[in-house]
Image (cartoon, rainbow, N blue to C red):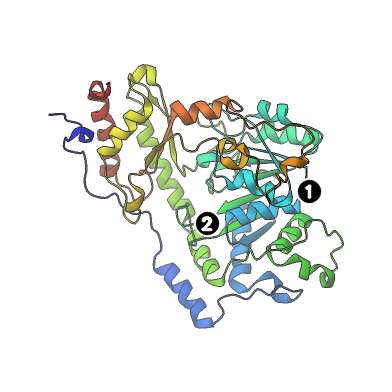
Amino acid sequence: MSELAIFGGKPVRKKLFPAYTFIGIEEKAAVNRVMDSGVLSRFLGCWHPDFYGGTEIQAFEKEWAEYMGIKHAIAVNSCTSGLQAAVGALGISPGDEVIVSPFTMAASATAPLLYGGIPVFADIEPEYFCLDVESVRQKITVRTKAIIVVDIFGQPYNVQALNVLAKEYNIPIIEDCAQGPGAQFQGRYAGTLADIGVYSLNYHKHIHTGEGGMIVTNNDDLAERMRLIRNHAEAVVEDKGTEDLVNMVGFNFRLTELQAAIGREQLKKLKTLFDERIKNCNYLNEQLSKIPGIRSPGLRPDATHAYYLHPFLFDEAKVGVHRDIFINAVKAELPATALRELEGQQIGVGYTKPLYLLPLFQKQIAIGSKGFPFTTASHLLSYEKGLCPVAEDLYEKKLFTHEFMRPPATREDLNDVIRAFQKVYEHRNELIF
C-alpha cells in the first residue's frame, strides 16, 4: 500500500490548522463603546460637518495616516471601492488607457472600466511578480492616463524604476496595497510609495474590519475628490463649491463607525502580526528550499515582504512531477484551517488565471451590451493568450502559494507542513503515471 495519503496512506496531519483570528477584548470594548453611543454611522450625503463621517471614522483615518507617515487617509467600505474612487479622482474618462497587472485580484484591473477606461495589461517580473517596468514602458501610448501597480503577495513594486518611468511620461500611479500593509521599501510603508495607495481590510487580510478599505495620498486635491466620490459627490459639489465636475458622480463607499472602531484596535496589532509572518516564512523558506526543485523567490533589495500569501517556485524538471500533481498530493497530507474549513487546504497552484483570459476581456463585454468601453479604443485590442508570457508560465507551471504561515501558527504547525512536502518528494515516483 502507498505511503501517500492521496493513495490511501496515513496523512501527516488531521488536526485543523489554527484559525487566523485576532478579534480580542480590545475590539469588543471598542464595539461596545460605539453601541453605547447609539451612533453606528454619522455620514451625511450633503455638504455638512458630518459629510466626513463620525468620530470613529475620523479618528481611524487620522491614526492610519500617522502610522503610515502620509498626509491623508480616507476610509472606504472595501479596497475595490478605494480603487474605483482613486481611478475616478484621477479623471479617467472613456477611451483612456490604464496599465494594469494580469496577475492579481480582478478589481485591480477592472476599476478603470467604471469610468470607461480601458485596461492594458503589462507582464510581471519572473522573480517578484509585480509589474515589469520594461513591459510597462512598451505599453505606454499617448492615451495612457494611469498605472495601477500591485504589491502582490505583500512584495512592494519596483518603486525606483517605475516611479521614474511614470514621471518621465507624467503618468500617475495607483498602488494596490491590499496584500502589503506593513511592508516597506527604503523605510517607507507600502501603500505610500505612489500617488495614491489603497489597502484592504476584509476578513482574511493582515488586519480586518470584516469588510473595509483605506485610501492614502499626500495630494490634497486628490484626497478631497476621493472623499467626494465616496459620499454622493453629485449632491455635495454645489454647496461645497467644487468646480471640477469630472467624475463627480458619487457612490456610497462609506465605512461604519463600528468597523472604524474595530480597525483602530486592529491597526495597533499590525506590527506584531507582520513580524510573526516574517519569522514563520523565513523558517519555511529555509526548510522547503532544501527540497530539490522548490525554492523561495527573491526579496526585492531594500524591501520587506508582508507575506499575505507565501509564494514558492516549482521546477518540474528537477522534481520529475508536474506541479499540480505534486501539490495535490501535499494537500492530501494536510487538513483545512479552522473557520475556513469549506475552502479546503490553504495551499494552491498558479494563484490566478491571467485576467485578460477572463470572459470579460475575451468577449470585450463590460458596460452594457455593445462593447463599451472597448469600442472607444484607438486601436485594435488584443487580449489573446500569450499576451503576458511570464504571468502565464507562473500560472500554468511554476508558482504555488500557501497560507499556513499565518499567526498563530506554531513551529509544530510549520513542521507538519514541511513533513508533508518532504514525504511527497520522497515518494514522488508514485505520482508518475
Residue at point 57%, 45% (across, down): 106
Identify the residue under disc 1.
Answer: 93
**Label 2 belongs to which residue?**
201
User: Which mark's residue is nearer the viewer, 1 or 2?
Assistant: 1
Tell me where residue 99 sits by quadrant.
top right
- Of labels 1 and 2, earlier in sequence is 1
Quarter of the image where one finds residue 374: top right
Q: Secondary structure at mark 2?
A: loop
Q: Is residue 225 among the parts visible in the rendering?
A: yes
Q: What is the C-alpha distance between the residues marked 1 and 2?
A: 28 Å
Q: Residue furthest front?
A: 369
Q: Where is 33 relative to 316, above or below? A: below
Q: Position of residue 350 (x, y in %)?
A: 45, 34
Identity, as a three-letter code, of the amino acid under mark 2: Leu
Q: Write the residue at 38% across / 32% down.
A: 285
Residue 61 percent coordinates (x, y) = 62, 63
